[in-house]
Amino acid sequence: MYTSKISGLGSYVPENVVTNDDLSKIMDTNDAWIQERTGIKERRHIKKGDGNSTSVMGVKAAKIALERAGLTTDDIDLIIFATLSPDMYFPGGGVRVQHMMNMKTIPALDVRNQCSGFIYALSVADQFIKTGMYKNVLVIGSENHSGGLDMTTRGRGVSVIFGDGAGAAVVTRSEEEGRGILSTHLHSEGAHAKELSLEGPSTEHWVPEIIEENPQENIPYYPYMNGQFVFKNAVVRFSEVINEGLQANHLTARDIDMLIPHQANLRISQFVQKQFKLSDDQVYNNIQKYGNTTAASIPIALTEAWEKGKIKEGDLVVLAAFGSGFTWGSAIIRW
Ligand code: UT7
């Protein structure tokens, strides 16, 4: 009977810091509004010419994770790459990582589950390992949001929230029962697909059509978010899926040592923290520094929490995410 554990973690964010004041110079927004509603103080944006892209950042995070796992690229059996902002429309980022890291012709799988992307990817890695098919899986979450945001006042409800960055985890086969990834729990509700979406370019909104029909207004190739609706669903689903994970393992909230919520909005994290009666030390947040980095947010936060010594052997670590789709999920890990 195989189990799987996280054997290495890494993260990377671009050097270019964009503060709330920087944004207020290019759109009608302000530091007080952004901090009060989201907790965000600054985020990182790729700078033109700095060499970064979604897959390049993913590679940078992956190299750190591999080194910390004590493995080389030859040890990896599968790449799983989660993003909503791939370098190209197709193919996905996984094959670019395979090429840039000079890896063997191992499989590369792309996951498109937005804010839940890392949890979905982790779950797939966990299943491949538990069935005995693979020994080491490289899981990456990476986003280049800044390249696709409407940075005018029209887009302020979305653009001030998102930031760029990448995180990676090496998931490795183990035989230690009761340790590692205990379980993962995934959900979707496609009825709300349009509430947080980027509709074009796509086969529904092809480029010539966009140019003809939307010369100025209502451009469907910028992301749309029904913020309040997403917020209301997020707080309910976060709690549900954390409870589901705890119950599946006969645990309660009192057993949680560290909760790492997807960094969607500090107010959502604080709401969940209160619901589960957790102390500030039991919930890790870094949205203040990076904004919402979607599929990258959990692996970046997990890496930072681990680097700061906030996760120790034997700790119960809970990961949870909610986002576009809607999709949501949790992972229960005995470190
Ligand atoms: O990670 C994926 C999941 N995503 C989420 O979980 C996001 C969930 N939603 C949210 O975090 C919040 O809904 C937001 C932070 C996005 C927005 O906060 P809100 O309290 O729901 O604000 P709102 O959209 O209702 O807008 C309130 C007002 C509006 O003005 P009026 O109509 O009241 O005059 C907006 O136009 O704030 C205005 N506004 C802004 N003002 C300054 C919207 N964006 C901005 C801005 N700066 N950036």
Image (cartoon, grey):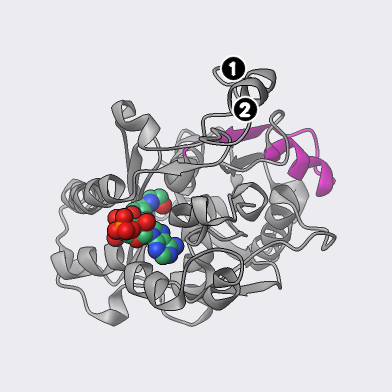
The image shows residue 89, relative to residue 285, as above or below, that is above
Say if residue 301 shows up in the picture. yes
Q: Position of residue 318 (x, y in %)?
A: 32, 60
Residue 164: x and y, percent? 61, 59
Image side of residue 326 versus residue 30, left or right: left
Q: Which residues are magenta?
A: 93-113
Quarter for ligand 1? Answer: bottom left
Residue position marked by numbered label 1 in the rendering: 203
Which image quadrant: the C terminus?
bottom left
Q: Are marks 2 and 1 in contact (CB under 8 Å)?
A: no
Disc sitting over residue 169 in the figure: none
Q: Secondary structure at mark 2?
A: loop
Q: Residue at x 30, y 46 (%)?
A: 230
Kindly identify which numbered label has been placed on residue 201.
2
98 magenta-colored: yes
* Rendered residue at 76%/50% (across/down): 73
